[in-house]
Amino acid sequence: MMLEKTTRMNYLYDFYQELLTGKQRDYMSLYYLDDFSLGEIAEQFSVSRQAVYDNIKRTETILEQYEEKLHLYEKFQKRRQLLNNLAERLKGKMTDEDQLCSLQIVKELNELD
């Protein structure tokens, strides 16, 4: 579960980091990307461990709110799934049905943007 949350936060951070403040970016980057502990981040910024924890939790909530409104991560996952499906279909000899399915996948990919 923790790995799933970390992966999700890393993706949300990648998509929405420009919408965060400098401090939020710093804390999230150190915590999620560089695997710093709360104590290490607190020491680096001369703040309490609790202040770092609170900032990270608030920022996680903000990132989730951005995703609820903009759906960039959801669309990324769907696009990746469709591309994987397309790649699988294109590996072998293509029947008429495969060609139609491939065209449908391409159409859906285009609609995501």
Image: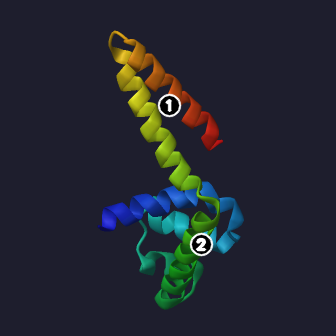
Marks 1 and 2 sit apart, C-alpha to C-alpha, by: 29 Å
Badge 2: residue crowd in 10 Å (few <14, some 14–19, many ≥20): few
| Residue matched to label 1 | 105
Q: Is residue 40 left or right of residue 88?
A: right
Q: Which mark is residue 49?
A: none
- Residue 74, x across and y down, in percent: 51, 54
* SS for dot 2: helix
- Residue 41, x across and y down, in percent: 50, 76
Q: Is residue 113 visible?
A: yes
Badge 1: residue crowd in 10 Å (few <14, some 14–19, many ≥20): some
Nearer the N terminus, badge 1 or badge 2? 2
- Residue 98, x across and y down, in percent: 40, 19
Front-most of 85 and 5?
85
| Residue matched to label 2 | 65
Q: Is residue 55 left or right of residue 34?
A: right
Image quadrant assignment for residue 29: bottom right
In the image, residue 9 above or below residue 101 = below
The amino acid pointed to by label 1 is Ile
* SS for dot 1: helix
Specify the quadrant that holds the N terminus.
bottom left
Front-most of 44 and 58?
58
Front-most of 40 and 65?
65
